[in-house]
Image: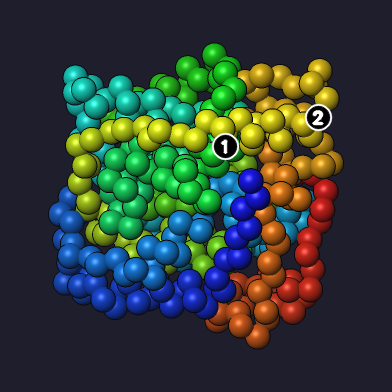
Amino acid sequence: MTHRLTLPSGRSLMSAMVAAVLVGTLGASSLRPASAAPQFRITTALRMQLPTMSTGQHQSFIVTGETAQERNALIPLAGGRLAEMGGFTAISPESAQYATALKCMTQAIYYEAANEPVQGKRAVAQVVINRLLHPAYPNSVCGVVYEGANAPVCQFSFTCDGSLLRAPAALQWAESRRVAQAALAGSVMREVGSATNYHADYVLPRWAFTLGKVTKIGAHIFYRLPGAIGNAAVFGDRWSGVERIPALDLNRLRRALEADDALLPPEELVPGLTVVADVKDRHSDADVGGRLDTTRAWRLEIPDPQQLSASYSNSVSGQGVSAAQIAGDPGNEGDR
């Protein structure tokens, strides 16, 4: 099934986020410790915007390939100190929910960062924990990981692109599981602070200009929500107490996997490992998850330069590239 997604402009995204701050009561509650959830109201507009910022194929790219790596490197880091996040220890290893939470966390780390360094795996785990504690996201590990799995837009692409039907590689799975256990035992990856989003460096999604760039670890670039909604004090939600993997549309997963495998001759596929890079897709050698078939899974939509938000334009001008140039350049169509 073809899913076409046209993302809103940077201006509407930032307006929604600003509105979320205005309707909240962060003025006084921002002084509270992270363990105490402030009174923070998420607007309907913000809830509609955040799910479009996926880690995978269901997003709109400004550019891909080597050009994306160059432009990503030019995006400046967000100013200020990194948020100091507390360790997450709400799920007891003896509880009935722990095994399910551990499986979901391990899957996220493996399918998103199996061939990344340990620090890269820890960073992905921290993003999952950060989302769990933020009021804009589900309040369970599996809820975060499988958000949108049966919707047109899945937050973690492996939950809807067929990757789950591939058997994992034993060594990478074991390491991912160890990192997951540490994250659920309170380990904190301080280098990513309050990051809730990331993307691979070989793509440049439009939403990258609306968030605060925190750091780059391995092939992933991490971002925090802008302004007060990304402050540590907001991450005070509590674990829901329930972990559940939703029933998935297996026919959808099979179709996605078949479309992925069809891009290469069967003899070139290695089950459970990354597939060989090919000019017909955008896929990094470090990836384990599915491919991005640009003829089917997404549609490139370049924003009108006249409609760009001020933050977007400022970010672009800081790279020495005009907004008009970016809007007129659909990007490199080579390997990802």
Q: Which residue is drawn at 73% across and 54% down?
A: 64
Query: Horizontal and vertical percent for residue 334?
Result: 83, 48
Residue 10 in the image: x percent, y percent? 55, 73
Left or right, 163 with reference to 334: left
- Examine the rendered structure and indicate whether residue 132 appears above or below residue 256: below
Nearest the viewer among 242 and 278 is 242
Q: Which residue is drawn at 50% across and 20% down?
A: 173
Asked if the residue under mark 2 is in contact with the one under mark 1, i.e. CB atoms within 8 Å, the reply is no
Q: How crowded is mark 1: few (under 14 residues within 10 Å), some or many (20 or more)?
A: some
Element at label 2:
loop
Which of the 4 image quarters holds residue 225? bottom left
Q: How is the image coloured?
A: rainbow
Whether residue 178 is visible, yes or no, is: yes
**Quadrant housing the C terminus:** top right
Q: Which mark is residue 264?
A: 2
Q: Is residue 98 above or below residue 135?
A: above
Q: Residue at x 60, y 60 (%)?
A: 5
* 44 shown above or below 275: below
Alpha carbon distance from label 1 to label 2: 20 Å
Label annotation for residue 20: none
Residue 140 versus residue 198 in the image, above or below = above
Residue 89 seen in the figure: no
Task: Bin the neighbour count of mark 2 within 10 Å (Cα to Cα): few under 14, some 14-19, many 20 and up.
Answer: some
Which residue is depicted at the point 62% across and 53% down? 3
Foreground disc of the pair 1, 2: 1
Left or right: residue 51 compared with residue 143: right
Q: Which amino acid does label 2 sit on?
A: Leu
> What residue is shown with label 1?
252
SS at mark 1 in the image: helix
